[in-house]
Image: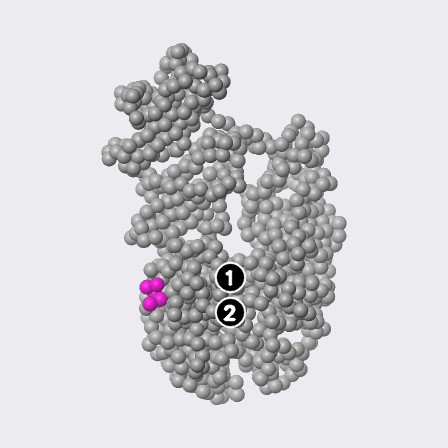
């Protein structure tokens, strides 16, 4: 089958980070899955697609291996993959993928060959030296879908920076170098890497089952124990093999977030276990690079935990790394990413000096991040990406449980020819320690960036929905520097409705660490009394380090949201009651998996409700379920009948976490009574999957169908075809409501705070109403409070008369208070401007100014008071 459409198709699939392959749920019999290979060439990140299309077992350069039903094979072909069904899984045999030249030595039956790799079935239990570069045992268990990797954004870097480089080209530096990371990179010692490689290669063998591997283990442990700041442990995963060695540096801010760095320290001689296996390049070199990385990272202070692991049993089929990855997965550990180094010190004469990043069984976004980091910190080291023919390495164990992984390698086509022989020694094999140093420099740079040098901590209580259309909406952020560099600035970026994003600087408060400011009211900013406002916060310290809220590696991925206006609900349900409150659900075809309760985070679904504890969802993922909808199903969830008589302007508002295949194949839709009001998009090629990675507020105008009706029902529907099943609907906090105009106070101010030292301006807007058109108004102020108020004429002005301000009269004929008095317009409106010059006075910070307005001749109307506080 032609492969031309595949690259374009997969581009959309990869960046969406699709959510789940899923076995059948209760009530759905699972069709038999047979052995399937997907012929290459496979583009970078193919695993991200294949994990969702079949029971995926691994990607081996020339092809991928898995198990699939006949329907899933059809879906693979429909997506442009060259899928070949090989019949049932071979009984009593294990599958091994080997390079073509190594396959005859394995014996057994050749099942498939492509791209220089061969799939062989050998008797179960037969010893196979399955290594990353000659042969690999196919693990008969399905991979989990990849968790999304989001690029960290360092100071000065673009949150959405891309790259435009060919497979063999260099990269543009789209990551700005952090001096703290750069300082570690420059300390990478070529001499240390050479010495460690030489020491490990001096052992006769490091075969996983030998006594010598324990000697090597003891030496490595001693080196790590001599490094301050590391906690060193070992983990025995198999009594026949040496243990994994683990060195941990606990994060200072987010110890629960873990970065895994790995290399295997065992070796093998392919001609027999009694022969010498020095393994200098494979993989004393990678182990040495990891030891140097651990030494350097131990010097720093990082937000996240760094976990360096030296694996044993890699040469027998990634056994040590599989045990570690599965243990982390079973414990629910929040792993940011995994970086692997395997063979970094050989360069063939005449070959370019570069870093090769393997694309099979790796995360394409993480791999691109590693390229960008290399360009920023090791600009003399070009990067190349491509497929490693046959085999794999320890990163694949983490990819198999859904952890984003990357693989650092010396050369995709010309790695050492002495692999797995007695000649894999320092000199003939490990022959270029300048290359090993530079690859380790890149590795250190990526690791330190992902670990996150400690700089700032932020805390903020998000703004809640409000009926106040006049604003402003006060912001308060506690920004704490965790280093010697003080917080220099805090900025809010905000958007009203679909308008352009704007920014406003916050200022230091009188309270230590507190920064304050405000967002403008929707009336002044957008000329409306209703609206949705989103915002995010950025703090920067004196050294240029940055921290975003809501927290995320990329600031563009998350924002806070609140609604302005009076939300009048015809129906509202947070799904928290003891019963279903009239909601019903039904199977049309194959399976009804609608469930109400607490989500548990299976198949990319949320791990918690948007509010409260309960949601409605397709398959909550509890015991006996997997979190994903089934294949060839159709079902729906429907609200009780809602009486909307007398209600107009209705919108359907709810919190959504949805993952569904492109509408060409699977349809998630919403109907009001029998009319569809929303459906997931369909695109040519079926590549635009709808994937939520967080709760998202939805707002659908359904007024044409729902206004003023005796009975309105809201129905959520799901229909799938024969493959690629995702997490489906998760719905919370649903309202059928109209957003009515918010309230506008008679007097509003433009800001909540003024700078005492820098000065500033407060714009005041007065609206007494048309009944007072043409009357004279006066805006007054007080510096001592707003209660109990001052009686004037027939009203009480909500200010306290004080000697300092004389209710504002002290500003008559001065430029500090412009238009404080004048005639109201035909609509009864007026404006005033209070300008505070820069004043150096210890008395001002913390002082409140209270403004209020009243009419003159007679004094028979007074506004509310607004308060503006001076900050340092």
Residue 330 vertical position relative to residue 116 in the rendered view, above or below: above
Numbered disc 2: secondary structure: loop
Residue 507 among magenta residues: no
Which percent across, then down, holds residue 324? 50, 67
Which callout, 2 or 1, points at the residue further toward the start of the chain?
A: 2
Residue 330 occupies which quadrant of the picture? bottom right
Between residues 689 and 710, which one lies in front from this camera angle? 689
Say if residue 732 shows up in the picture. yes
Between residues 738 and 579, which one lies in front from this camera angle? 738
Q: Is residue 43 left or right of residue 196?
A: right
Query: Could you tell me how far apart the alpha carbons at marks 2 and 1 are, in whole angstroms?
Result: 15 Å
Mark 1 crowd level (few <14, some 14–19, many ≥20, 10 Å Cα): many
Residue at horizontal 55%, vertical 47%?
Answer: 695
Q: Is residue 598 left or right of residue 32?
A: left
Q: Give the extent of the magenta segment.
A: 182-186
Which percent across, then down, holds residue 101? 58, 84
In which quadrant of the rendered image does the N terminus lie?
bottom right
Residue 532 vertical position relative to residue 548 in the rendered view, above or below: above
Tell me the number on the disc at residue 614.
none
Question: What residue does disc 2 label?
Answer: 167
Which label lies toward us, 2 or 1? Answer: 2
Residue 184 among magenta residues: yes
Tag count in the figure? 2
Residue at horizontal 36%, vertical 34%?
Answer: 753
Question: What residue does disc 1 label?
Answer: 365
**Magenta region's main secondary structure?**
helix
Residue 43 vertical position relative to residue 554 in the rendered view, above or below: below
Residue at horizontal 39%, vertical 20%?
Answer: 853
Which percent across, then down, holds residue 403? 52, 62
Residue 64 occupies which quadrant of the picture? bottom right
Which percent across, then down, holds residue 517? 38, 38
Residue at horizontal 62%, vertical 54%?
Answer: 689
């Amino acid at each position: 089958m032609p492969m031309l459409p595949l690259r374009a198709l997969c581009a959309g699939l990869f960046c969406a980070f699709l959510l789940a392959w899923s076995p059948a749920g209760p009530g759905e019999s699972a069709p038999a899955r047979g052995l399937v290979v997907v012929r290459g060439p496979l583009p970078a990140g193919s695993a991200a697609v294949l994990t969702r299309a079949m029971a995926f077992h691994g990607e081996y350069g020339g092809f991928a291996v898995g198990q699939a039903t006949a329907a899933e094979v059809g879906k693979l072909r429909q997506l442009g993959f060259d899928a070949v069904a090989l019949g049932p899984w071979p009984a009593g045999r294990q599958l091994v993928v080997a390079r073509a030249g190594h396959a005859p030595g394995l014996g057994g039956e050749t099942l498939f060959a492509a791209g220089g790799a061969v799939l062989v079935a050998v008797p179960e239990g037969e010893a196979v030296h399955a290594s990353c570069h000659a042969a690999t045992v196919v693990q008969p268990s399905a991979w989990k879908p990849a968790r999304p990797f989001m690029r960290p954004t360092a100071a000065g870097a673009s949150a959405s920076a891309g790259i435009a480089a060919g497979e063999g080209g260099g990269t543009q530096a789209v990551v700005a170098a952090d001096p703290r990371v750069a300082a570690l990179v420059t300390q990478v010692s070529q001499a240390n890497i050479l010495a460690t490689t030489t020491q490990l290669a001096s052992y006769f063998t490091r075969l996983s089952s030998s006594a010598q591997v324990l000697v090597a283990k003891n030496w490595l442990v001693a080196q790590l124990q001599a490094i301050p700041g590391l906690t060193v442990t070992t983990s025995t995963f198999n009594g026949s093999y040496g243990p994994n060695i683990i060195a941990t540096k606990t994060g200072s801010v987010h110890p629960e977030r873990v970065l895994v760095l790995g290399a295997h320290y065992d070796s093998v001689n392919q001609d027999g276990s009694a022969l010498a296996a020095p393994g200098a390049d494979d993989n004393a070199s990678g182990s040495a690079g990891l030891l140097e990385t651990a030494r350097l990272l131990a010097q720093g202070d990082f937000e996240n935990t760094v976990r360096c692991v030296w694996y044993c049993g890699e040469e027998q089929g990634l056994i040590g790394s599989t045990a570690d990855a599965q243990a982390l997965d079973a414990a629910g550990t929040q792993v940011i990413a995994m970086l692997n180094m395997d063979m970094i010190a050989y360069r063939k004469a005449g070959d370019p000096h570069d870093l090769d990043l393997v694309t099979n069984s790796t995360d394409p976004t993480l791999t691109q991040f590693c390229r960008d980091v290399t360009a920023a910190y090791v600009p003399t080291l070009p990067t190349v990406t491509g497929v490693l023919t046959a085999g794999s390495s320890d990163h694949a164990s983490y990819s198999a449980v859904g952890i984003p992984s990357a693989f650092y390698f010396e050369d995709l086509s010309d790695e050492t020819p002495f692999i797995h022989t007695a000649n894999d020694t320092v000199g003939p094999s490990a022959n270029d320690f300048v290359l090993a140093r530079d690859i380790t420099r890149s590795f250190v740079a990526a690791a330190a960036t992902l670990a996150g040098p400690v700089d700032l901590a932020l805390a903020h209580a998000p703004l809640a929905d409000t009926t106040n259309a006049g604003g402003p909406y006060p912001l308060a952020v506690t920004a704490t520097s965790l280093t010697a560099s003080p917080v220099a600035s805090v900025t809010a970026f905000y958007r009203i409705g679909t308008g352009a994003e704007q920014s406003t600087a916050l200022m230091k408060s009188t309270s230590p660490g507190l920064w304050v400011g405000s967002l403008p009211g929707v009336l002044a900013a957008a000329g409306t009394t209703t609206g949705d406002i989103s915002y995010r916060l950025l703090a920067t310290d004196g050294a240029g380090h940055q921290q975003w809220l809501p927290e995320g590696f990329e600031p563009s991925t998350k924002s806070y949201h609140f609604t302005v206006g009076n939300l009048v609900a015809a129906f509202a349900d947070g799904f928290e009651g003891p019963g279903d409150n009239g909601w019903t659900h039904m199977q049309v075809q194959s399976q009804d998996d609608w469930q109400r309760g607490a989500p548990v985070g299976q198949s990319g679904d949320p791990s918690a409700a948007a509010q409260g504890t309960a949601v409605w969802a397709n398959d909550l993922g509890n015991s006996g379920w997997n979190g994903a909808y089934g294949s060839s199903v159709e079902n729906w969830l429907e609200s009780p009948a809602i009486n909307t008589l007398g209600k107009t302007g209705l919108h359907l508002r709810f919190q959504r976490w949805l993952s569904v295949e492109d509408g060409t194949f699977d349809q998630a839709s919403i109907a009001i009574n029998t009319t569809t009001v929303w459906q997931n998009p369909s695109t040519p090629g079926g590549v635009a999957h709808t994937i939520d990675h967080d709760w998202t507020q939805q707002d659908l105008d359904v007024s044409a169908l729902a206004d003023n009706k005796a009975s309105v029902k809201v129905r959520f529907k799901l229909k799938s075809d024969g493959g690629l099943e995702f997490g489906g609907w998760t719905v919370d906090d649903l309202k059928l409501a109209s957003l009515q105009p918010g309230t506008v106070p008679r007097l509003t101010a433009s800001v909540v705070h003024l700078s005492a030292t820098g000065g500033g301006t407060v714009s005041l807007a007065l609206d007494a109403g048309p009944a007072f058109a043409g009357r004279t108004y006066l805006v007054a102020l007080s510096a001592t409070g707003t209660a109990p108020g001052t009686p004037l004429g027939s009203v009480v002005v909500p200010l306290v008369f004080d000697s300092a301000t004389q209710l504002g009269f002290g500003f008559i004929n001065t430029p500090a208070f412009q238009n404080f008095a004048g005639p109201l317009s035909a609509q009864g409106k007026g404006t005033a401007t209070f300008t505070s010059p820069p004043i150096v006075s210890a008395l001002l910070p913390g002082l409140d100014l209270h403004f209020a307005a009243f009419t003159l001749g007679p004094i028979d109307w007074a506004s509310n008071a607004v308060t503006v506080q001076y900050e340092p």
